[in-house]
Image (cartoon, grey):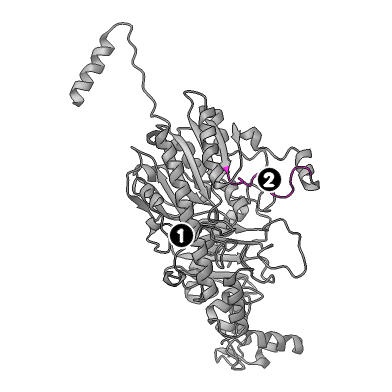
Amino acid sequence: MKAVLLFLVLLLLSIPGVRVTAVEPSRPNILFLLSDDHSYPFVGCYGDTNVKTPALDQFTAEGMKFHRFFTTAPQCVPSRASLLTGRSAVAARITRFSSPLAREEIAFPEVLREKAGYFTGVCGRSYHLDGSAGNRGDAIGQLLEKHGLRTFDQRLDYVKQGSDKQALEQMKEFLDRKPEGKLFCLWLNFSDPHHPWNAPDTDRPDPASLKLPAHWPDLPGMRAQLADYCAEVNRLDRSVQGVLQLLVARGLSQNTLVVFAGDNGAALPHGKGSLYDPGCNVPFIVRWPSVVKPGGESRALLSGEDLAPTLLAAAGVPVPAKMTGVSFLPLLRGEPFTPRKYLFTERGPHGNAPVTVNMKNSGYDLSRAVRSDRYKFIYNCTPWIPYSPVDSAGGAAWQEMTAAHTDGKLAAPLVATYFTTPRPVYEFYDLNEDPSELRNLSGQPALAQVERELRLALAEKMITDFDYLPLPAISEASGTEPAGNRAAQFRQKDANKDGKLSLEEFSAGRDAAEAKKWFDLRDANNDSFLSREEFVPGSPLPKNQ
């Protein structure tokens, strides 16, 4: 066959006046489906038995699933900004939840429209990037209008917002308006599984049948709220099914690259608003007929920054130099691919409420994290603000957890994670041994070198993104400790070299009353001595139960 084709090409070339030109690979339409507050692994294709998602499971069988895709933030606004711009939320100056996306930050659909003639749009649930503080007409809204900060009507050809049911009708309208012969790029947002959790009872699993991870205590309220959440995911599956069926009905399914992802984690403890994995690790599935091999999967580390450059590369459009994400197009094509060594996440203010004296970190928190294949380092810059879950503090799960803590019935690792204030400045986890991130290993001598490597990687990211937070402490060189390092202080204070500090040793050179206060706070096991493990962490360990 190849010989026949070669003969025909040579024959054409031999005919006077005939010119053969290379044909560019066909560009795909692009459909980006985004669910809201959707943690990995809450899709059936990942082996999760708490949910029933036949449409997404079939979609996955026709494409490729990714286990370790992380949004750049555990909140919708900064996360979505990164997905659209290929940059971190810090670099894009949108860590404040209510911020609009600055006009000079370019979204990938704009590039597709400008460079490749795509018809572009967004529909469904709010896309969140035109400033979530202030409606049109109120004082804040008027300021946004005054300075021209609501820009998506300029960026895209079609901009609509609505419910999940309306999203399908809006997609039909978008396709009807698409000029003949133009490719399209549509970003369709779903509300599910975001609050309010009001899916039909027929979608709700039996709470008693659910499997709970280690970071959630087995309490009736926890099971009840998880069942409500899973019902939302099950309803979402039907919404996705309607969209995919519309592609088939319009004859578009074979030339459309479809991406399905969550924007951040579930609104439950340890999830949304948290830099633990459930806050940023989301479902991520890609179907691209004739390019992505059906049934594939990957455990490569992928960041929300990587989506925009990947979709541009898939369309054959040059990636703007401003985008810091890494295209994983080779991974989709089954070609050699060098995965990330690290990915980075950030947490900033959430919602629109102003600062108050007694606020919890659900509304205001400043923290950064870096993750490798095995380890996670979290840097908390507002550790004095008590923890509270985003969007679920009033729910039965958190209320029962709080009551269990008050009654002394909550397990020590959960007390340390949720109810210890101040929280540790530094957290370090071995994700192979502790996937729920409940045992903070920061300061452990055996892991000092790898912790230093992650701290340095985070510092580099903060520097290159022009982060406004102070950098984390970094040891001066491999195997050495900076001045003021608590491990060095421990050795200096341990006058009799017995491996523990008495109150007298701890108090040397300090005000006696202040020293006694901190000694008692750090004496986690109440044995009247401070071990190295009790002294070295930046914040006191939780008291033993």
Q: Position of residue 238 (x, y in %)?
A: 45, 49
Q: Is residue 134 a member of the stretch shown in magenta?
A: yes
**Residue labelled with disc 1:** 202
Residue 15 vs 283, above or below: the answer is above
In the displayed structure, 422 sits above or below 68; it is below
Left of 236 or right of it: where is 407? Answer: right
Residue type marked 1: Thr
Q: Main secondary structure of the magenta part?
A: loop
- x 24%, y 16%: residue: 10
Q: Nearer the viewer, mark 1 or mark 2?
A: 1
Q: Magenta segment, which residues?
A: 124-137
The quadrant of the rendering that contains the N terminus is top left
Residue 403: percent from the left, percent from the top?
61, 80
* CA neighbours of label 2 inside 10 A, class few (<14), some (14 to 19), many (20+): many
Q: Amino acid at mark 2?
A: Pro
Which residue is labeled 2 in the image?
100
* Residue 5 marker: none
Q: Quadrant of residue 353?
A: bottom right
Which residue, as the protein is rendered here, is positioned at the far right? 139
- Say which of 112 and 376 sits in front: 112
- Assess whether residue 36 is covered by the magenta stretch: no
Q: Give the answer, above or below, for where 221 lies relative to 365.
A: below
Residue 252 position within the rendered picture, expressed as x and y whole percent measured from the top left? 41, 33
Viewer-proximal residue, 50 or 442? Answer: 50
Q: Is residue 515 left or right of residue 41?
A: right
Residue 517 at x, y percent in the picture: 71, 86
Residue sitting at x 36%, y 22%: 22
